[in-house]
């Protein structure tokens, strides 16, 4: 059988370099421990170290005990959609939607993947750096051509370049707060980007996975609150409630032609999100009191970690970085520490290797596209303050 003729979209999917990094870190960890007696500091992880809040776990158990174990309703359970509609109105200031504007999905990932599938074979734009899964998974799977619009060095938007790219593409991917930079796009930026997409007849895919992880009293702005029908928003409970393994998210759009299609795709690939999980997820977003306690507590802890890492980086000469307003990543630039003559893969992994040799694991910038290859992503989602301080001490020894 000429297998290469089949499954080409799956064959083109590359294993995320972050998965390879995790594997390398695991192996290196054993060696490092044997040599030094110490552990590697895991700044490479996008995983959260908190347990899912108790009220959500209890709701899942109650739903199971209450018989919510049958096939889910196509597109999502009524209880889930009602809770989501309330949350969209309360938190995202999105009004005027009904149940037909929402589809329950397996995490944000399925909402994003199905949307990419709608644009199969077309050109799609997005800001660089870009979340690695978009580049490694959705782009080959949907066979789209991805055109990067690099952010400026300070992560501001180059509107001239954006305007050029919007003339070419059918869909534009926007992630705010952003992985890997931690950039929270302002209300003005999001509104302007959405408006430019609309003027160019481009759909805007808004990935709001980190919507609730924002700092310093800043506010996340959802483009779906604008009354445009070219906006498709992907949400997830993964990050907000430390529910990464539950795989619950949803897609929302004013455009019911889109939800009709997404519903078909969703039904075809998974036949819907497990019924009892939808009931638990409804409780997660609906129980305002418990939500405030749980999410507030987690974000306060992330904030402490963010400050510790930020203050730590200030003590390291020759790196440039911004304090993130959202998500749980810092993405400093290390150009001053990379030999100018170094090129290609060697350059891309130079800092990463130096760090790993001294027991600091992070993700190199080329995992997030062809720009910002001298940057390195540090996640503070799964490290304690003590680990952060230890990591900073190790980095101070490397970059004197
Ligand atoms: C930018 C971004 N979007 C979406 C997701 C999807 O998360 P999930 O599929 O767990 O909801 C992630 C997960 O890491 C992410 O970083």
Image (cartoon, rainbow, N blue to C red):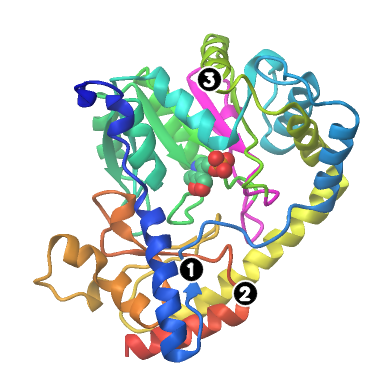
Residue 217 is inside the magenta segment: yes
Foreground: disc 3 or disc 1: 1
Q: Earlier in the sequence, mark 3 or mark 1?
A: 1
CB atoms of marks 3 and 1 within 8 Å: no
What is the crowding at mark 2: few (fewer than 14 residues within 10 Å), some, or many (at least 20)? some
Provide the residue designation for mark 2: 384
Q: Residues within 10 Å of mark 3 (few under 14, many from 20)?
A: some
Q: Please report the residue visible at 39 percent of the width from the left and 39 percent of the height from the top.
A: 134
Circle 3 SS class = loop
Q: Secondary structure at mark 1?
A: loop
Location of residue 243 with respect to 181 vertically, above or below: above
Distance from disc 2 to disc 1, alpha carbons, whole Å, reads: 10 Å
Task: Determine which quarter of the picture holds residue 202.
Answer: top left
Q: Quadrant of residue 147?
A: top left
In the rendered image, the residue lying farthest to the front is: 1
- Name the residue tied to disc 1: 43
Q: Is mark 1 within 8 Å of ligand 1?
A: no
Q: Determine which residue is flagged by label 3.
A: 228
CA gap, disc 2 and disc 3 = 42 Å
For residue 194, the mark is none
What range of the chain is rendered magenta?
213-242
Name the quarter where the C terminus is drawn: bottom left
Query: Is residue 176 among what the camera can see?
Result: no
Q: From the top left corner, tell me how far across and down residue 380 is, in percent.
A: 55, 66
Label 1 crowding class (10 Å Cα cut-off): few <14, some 14-19, many 20+? Answer: many
Report the residue at 23% width, 76% height from top: 336
Q: Position of residue 385 (x, y in %)?
A: 61, 78
Image point (89%, 33%), residue name = 65
Q: CA distance from mark 3 to mark 1?
A: 38 Å
Residues under numbered marks 2 and 3 in contact, where contact means CB atoms less than 8 Å apart? no
Residue 124: image location, x then y, percent: 32, 28
241 relative position to 201: left or right: right
């Amino acid at each position: 059988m000429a297998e290469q003729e089949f499954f080409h979209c799956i064959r083109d999917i590359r294993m995320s370099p972050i998965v390879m990094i995790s594997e390398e870190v695991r192996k290196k960890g054993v060696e490092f421990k044997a040599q030094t007696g110490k552990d590697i500091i895991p700044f490479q992880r996008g995983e959260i170290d908190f347990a899912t809040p108790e009220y959500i776990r209890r709701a899942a158990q109650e739903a199971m005990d209450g018989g919510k174990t049958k096939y889910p309703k196509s597109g999502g359970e009524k209880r889930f959609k009602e809770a989501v509609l309330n949350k969209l109105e309360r938190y995202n200031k999105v009004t005027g939607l009904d149940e037909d504007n929402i589809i329950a999905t397996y995490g944000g990932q399925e909402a994003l993947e199905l949307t990419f599938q709608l644009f199969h074979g077309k050109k799609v734009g997005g800001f660089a750096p870009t979340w690695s899964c978009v580049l490694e998974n959705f782009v080959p799977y949907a066979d789209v051509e991805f055109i990067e619009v690099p952010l400026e060095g300070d992560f501001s938007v180059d509107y001239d370049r954006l305007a050029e790219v919007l003339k070419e593409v059918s869909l534009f991917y926007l992630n705010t707060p952003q992985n890997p930079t931690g950039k929270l796009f302002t209300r003005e930026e999001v509104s302007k980007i959405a408006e430019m997409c609309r003027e160019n007849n481009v759909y805007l895919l808004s990935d709001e996975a980190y919507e609730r992880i924002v700092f310093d009293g800043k506010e996340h702005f959802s483009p779906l609150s604008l009354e445009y029908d070219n906006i498709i928003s992907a949400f997830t409970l993964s990050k907000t409630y430390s529910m990464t393994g539950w795989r619950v998210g949803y897609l929302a759009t004013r455009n019911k032609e889109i939800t009709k299609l997404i519903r078909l795709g969703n039904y075809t690939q998974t036949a819907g999100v497990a019924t009892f999980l939808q009931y638990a997820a409804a409780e997660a977003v609906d129980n305002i009191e418990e939500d405030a306690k749980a999410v507030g507590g987690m974000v306060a802890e992330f904030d402490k970690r963010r400050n510790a890492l930020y203050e730590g980086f200030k003590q390291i000469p020759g790196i440039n970085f911004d304090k993130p307003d959202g998500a749980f990543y810092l993405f400093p630039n290390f150009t001053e520490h990379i030999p100018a003559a170094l090129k290609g893969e060697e350059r891309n992994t130079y800092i990463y290797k130096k760090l790993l040799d001294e027991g600091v694991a992070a993700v190199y910038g080329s995992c997030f596209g062809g720009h910002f290859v001298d940057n390195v992503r540090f996640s503070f989602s799964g490290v304690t303050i003590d680990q952060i301080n230890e990591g900073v001490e190790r980095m101070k020894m490397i970059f004197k």
